[in-house]
Image (cartoon, rainbow, N blue to C red):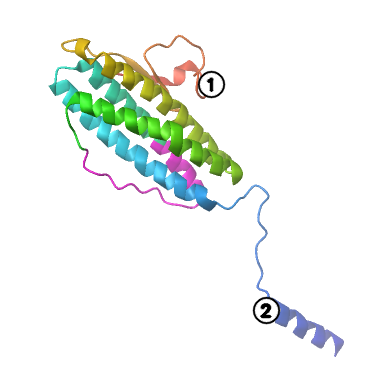
């Protein structure tokens, strides 16, 4: 009788309180970070498309050095998007981007738009996303956001110089840029042994011109 009663109690307990699988100590809820990753993925994907369109315009304007910069930055944005996508999948999401038709103006205007976009990501978007990822303990997202932030800061500098010297770029040859395939950092000189942003070996860089 006692065994029968005990069994009935156990069945009732399992009905009222369904079994929940234990959560691993290394698993943390995505929280706001997943949404931030999706925003960043969409932004980087659109930036890639926009910079490729800007590169074509710069080539048409006879500004090959500026076109080279836009192509290099586009490759970096592709790397950022891929990094974000990897973490999105790890958190159970699906990377999605809604690519908008790039608004292409004069090359000087395109450079101004690029500076504005990169400065926003450097000063506002990524710092906010990094703060949230740190609070939520999302190490993968934190790394991906930091990589992008460092590269965008350098892009803003390169675009600013390009705009300031645009008058001397007409008719000049393309410029060789190197892009880190790990973090997207972009430079014209490989005068280091490790990437200044992610510390990956120099051989992780590819040439984009």
Magenta region: 81-102
Gap between marks 1 and 2 measured at Cα: 53 Å
In the picture of the structure, the residue carrying the numbered disc 1 is: 199
Mark 1 vs mark 2: which is more N-terminal? Answer: 2
Q: Is residue 85 visible?
A: yes
In percent of width and height, residue 80 lies at 41, 34
Q: Is residue 181 visible?
A: no
34 on left or right of 139: left
Instruction: Name which residue lies at 61% across and 50% down.
Output: 28
Instruction: Name which residue lies at 30% across and 29% down.
Output: 114
Residue 59, placed above or below residue 18: above
In percent of width and height, residue 3 lies at 83, 84
Label 2: how many Cα within 10 Å (few below 14, some 14–19, many 20+): few
Q: Is residue 87 magenta?
A: yes
Residue 43, placed above or below residue 65: below
Instruction: Name which residue lies at 66% across and 79% down.
Output: 15
Checking the image for residue 8, the label placed there is: none
């Amino acid at each position: 009788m006692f065994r029968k009663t005990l069994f009935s109690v156990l069945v009732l307990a399992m009905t009222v309180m369904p079994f929940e699988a234990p959560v691993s100590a290394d698993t943390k809820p995505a929280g706001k970070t997943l949404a931030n990753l999706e925003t960043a993925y969409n932004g980087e994907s659109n930036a890639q498309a926009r910079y490729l369109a800007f590169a074509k315009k710069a080539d048409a304007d006879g500004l090959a050095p500026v076109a080279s910069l836009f192509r290099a930055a586009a490759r970096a944005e592709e790397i950022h998007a891929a990094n974000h996508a990897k973490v999105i999948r790890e958190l159970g999401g699906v990377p999605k981007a809604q690519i908008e038709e790039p608004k292409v103006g004069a090359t000087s205007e395109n450079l101004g738009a690029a500076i504005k976009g990169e400065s926003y990501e450097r000063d506002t978007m990524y710092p906010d996303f990094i703060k949230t990822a740190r609070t939520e303990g999302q190490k993968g997202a934190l790394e991906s956001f930091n990589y992008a932030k460092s590269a965008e800061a350098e892009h803003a500098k390169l675009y600013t110089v390009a705009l300031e010297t645009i008058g001397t770029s007409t008719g000049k040859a393309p410029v060789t840029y190197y892009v880190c395939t790990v973090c997207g950092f972009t430079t014209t000189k490989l005068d280091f042994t490790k990437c200044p942003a992610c510390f990956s070996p120099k051989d992780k860089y590819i040439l984009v011109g």
